[in-house]
Amino acid sequence: MRFSCSLPIGDAGSEDLLSIGAIAQCVQAVDQAGLDAVFVTDHPAPSSRWLAGGGHATLDPFVALSVAATATERLRLHTHILVLAYRNPLIVAKSIASLDRLCGGRLTVGIGTGYLKSEYAAVGVPFEERGDLTDEAIAVLRQAWTGEAIHYRGRHFECRDNRVLPTPAQTPLPIWGGGNAPRAIRRAVELCQGWSPFPAGGMLSKTAKTEELVNIDQLRDKIRYAHDLAEETGRTEPLEICVAALDDTIRQAGEQMDAARLIDAYAALAEVGVTWSTVSVAAPSLTAFVENVQRFGEEVAAKLPGASAY
């Protein structure tokens, strides 16, 4: 099991974390704790209603991860998730290729369709087209990253002999498709290197417009579906699977962290085939984040079967 840790730049009261120096300290703490990646999410223009109802502020993912890249030479940089349909795919291809080249090939691009109608309206993209636009964007990204001329007629753009240079450092650059629905799983299996299901139940499942995922049996069934699709399509490349602990009462590590329950939860995920897990660490202050991520590394990550000796 490998871990990608959220950078606490969207937490309530996180103003003291919104600086290059603070982000660097957070990244270095994650590195020293022996985890494997840091991640940020993507909400360029959410509504006030969503923010008031439990949403969170974000930095631009490419700006935040560029800062993170300068603070570590080991950790991977992870978008979890980037809403591809919000942006022209050539602009996205350039941002991703630039960051991957500059960080020496340490970027993992977690992507998804998003679910906020108001945000789609704000950026001028039809919400109803989000699935098709996401598939289209992946195809364009793959072409763009070859460095060769792109000839592609999209729904809202057309490439005529256009090129994106420089190319990424990685070939292929890993894309992990997010989502719980059959179409999202098929997208991950057919077009991506990994799949990122999202724990969701009750009102969250309805709000995010995604299928429920609240227990290990549901996850096992979805993983079985993914493997069946891989066999059906002739996929031979291993599929990375990244999901947070399914029990939301233990998902955020902090002073009251239940290490034993977390170890059991991650062991259960690994048993059904999960290879990565995202973790959020309580960050009421920079000092608290540093202490909590160190505690998670020592008391949870290092105790799991097969943990590295980093």
Image: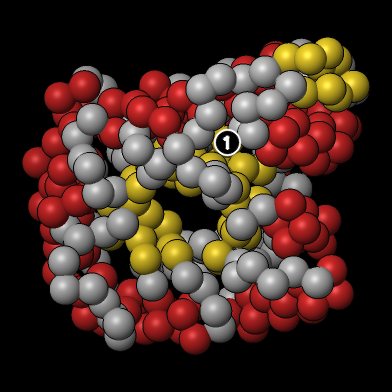
Dot 1 alpha-carbon crowd within 10 angstroms: few under 14, some 14 to 19, many 20 or more: many
Q: x, y percentage for residue 296?
A: 21, 64
> Can I make out residue 218 in this image?
no
Q: x, y percentage for residue 14?
A: 26, 29
Residue closest to the eye, 176 or 200:
176
> Can I make out residue 260 in this image?
yes
Quarter residue 115 falls in: top right
Image: 20 above or below 27: above
- Quadrant holding the C terminus: bottom left
Q: Amino acid at mark 1?
A: Leu
Image: 2 above or below 269: above
At x 62%, y 42%, the residue is 111
Image: 269 above or below 101: below
- The residue pinned by badge 1 equals 82
Q: Is residue 251 left or right of residue 16?
A: right
At x 56%, y 20%, the residue is 165
Q: Is residue 293 left or right of residue 216?
A: left
At x 77%, y 23%, the residue is 150
Quarter residue 12 falls in: top left
Instruction: Find numbered disc 1 in the image and state the secondary structure of the residue it sits on.
Output: strand
Q: Is residue 228 left or right of residue 70?
A: right
- Quadrant holding the N terminus: bottom left
Image: 241 above or below 271: above
- Farthest residue to the front: give it: 148
Q: How many marks?
A: 1
Q: x, y percentage for residue 241?
A: 56, 66
Q: x, y percentage for residue 125?
A: 79, 20
